[in-house]
Image (cartoon, helix red, strand yellow):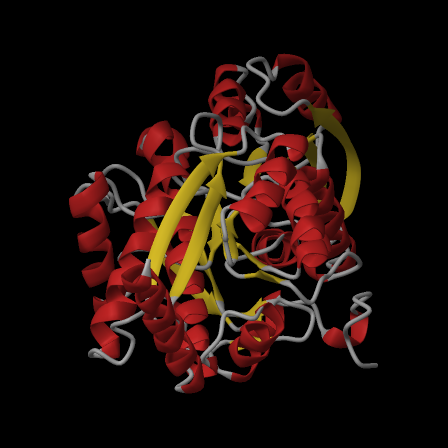
Amino acid sequence: MQRKALSCLAATLCMVSAMARGEVAGVRIGVLNDQSGIYADMGGKGSIEAARLAVEDFTAASAGANKGMKIEIISADHQNKADIGSAIAREWYDQKGVDLIVDIPNSSVALAVQAVAQDKGKLAIFSGASSSDLTNAKCSPNSFAWTYDTYGLAKGTAGALTRGAEDSWFFVTADYAFGQALERDAAAVVTAGKGKVIGSVRAPLDTPDYSSFLLKAQGSGAKYIGLANAGGDTITSIKQAGEFGLTDGGQTLAGLVVYLTDVHALGLSTARGLLLTASFYWDLNDETRAWSKRFHERTNRMPTMVQAGVYSGVLHYLKAVSAAGTTDAMTVAGQMRKTPVKDMMTDNAVLREDGKLARDMYLFQVKSPADSKAPWDYYKLVRRIPAGEVVRPLSESQCPLVRK
């Protein structure tokens, strides 16, 4: 009994000593995403590996400074259901000691998890979720939109294609928070560019049959068919659009959010010529190529921007925990905001008061089979788009955290 009491006392003294030195004993991070459905390829298990790479790189860069910090990565599948996602988040925060939840594709799930994080005084970083509402009308001091959002995607792709009144659009939209936000933001860009929105149609998430939706788009006569969907839904709609001969009739498909894994699944013969906006591509520079090679060694595929964003967000969070000497959510969030984000995919981006990471984006065009020189050589860079062009100005923000 005496030995046990002395052991407990020693452990307590060590913990107090570590706290006095500003050291953190442990951090637990949860990767919450779709691991079995239509968004599994662009995030899924690849996002878990990306988070592990961030832990490894943080540990290596610390050079022993944080050798006492135990960092654990756990994961779960939210099945694209908001109730399941929020229940997992609540359990993780309350019972599992999770400090941060990352990824969270599917904006309906993300909005639910965001509310739980704020209620529990914990943090969330969205890489897979993209509704601009997350940092606009429904912003939270506890969460960050890290990789991309519907506002930036719309500005990049719809902005590049719309040049005047002759540019008409019809939207095929995923019928939930993400699709609705993407259609809304893209329509605003089209209207600002003097183009016309002829109409839209809402398609259920993960529908196997787009025939009725595509026939309406075809019948509209619109110049551009805007696909306000993602992942498996984008793949299905593009394949079936080809079967219906939409592009043969002179209409152009505009994928408003396209991932590298979508192009891989479609093949270059089908996807060639597509314009798309993204925040990352594995073949941009030496840094992206080196990191992506490590990722490929573990997953046998190149990373999407979502997976790269998970790496970036986790790495920045761990740096902030180390600098702050605590896992207290608001203290760490403050440290994250005051430190520019710099890593293999991010060049000194600023984390704004509304929770949006103001990063540059890229406009790409999918190569033809003849232009591709190696596996995963899919994109041609059209232009780098400065953050100022693809991030909503704070003067237009509805976020209550923004100082007017």
- Compared across the picture, whether 83 is left or right of 291 comes to right
- In this rendering, the answer to whether 198 lies above or below 160 is above
Residue under the point 43% across and 78% down? 16
Camera-side residue of 283 and 336: 336
Residue under the point 40% across and 45% down? 74
- Compared across the picture, whether 12 is left or right of 59 comes to right
Please provide percent x and percent y for residue 320: 45, 76
- In this rendering, the answer to whether 181 lies above or below 202 is below
Camera-side residue of 181 and 135: 135
Whether residue 287 can be seen here:
yes
- In this rendering, the answer to whether 163 lies above or below 9 is above
Whether residue 163 can be seen here:
no
Camera-side residue of 362 and 356: 356
Quadrant of the rendered image containing residue 344: bottom left
Quarter holding the N terminus is bottom left
- Compared across the picture, whether 38 is left or right of 165 comes to left
Quarter holding the C terminus is bottom right
Residue under the point 64% across and 46% down? 113
Please provide percent x and percent y for residue 310: 42, 55
Number of numbered discs on residues: 0
Please provide percent x and percent y for residue 236: 50, 22
- In this rendering, the answer to whether 141 lies above or below 348 is above
Please provide percent x and percent y for residue 140: 71, 62
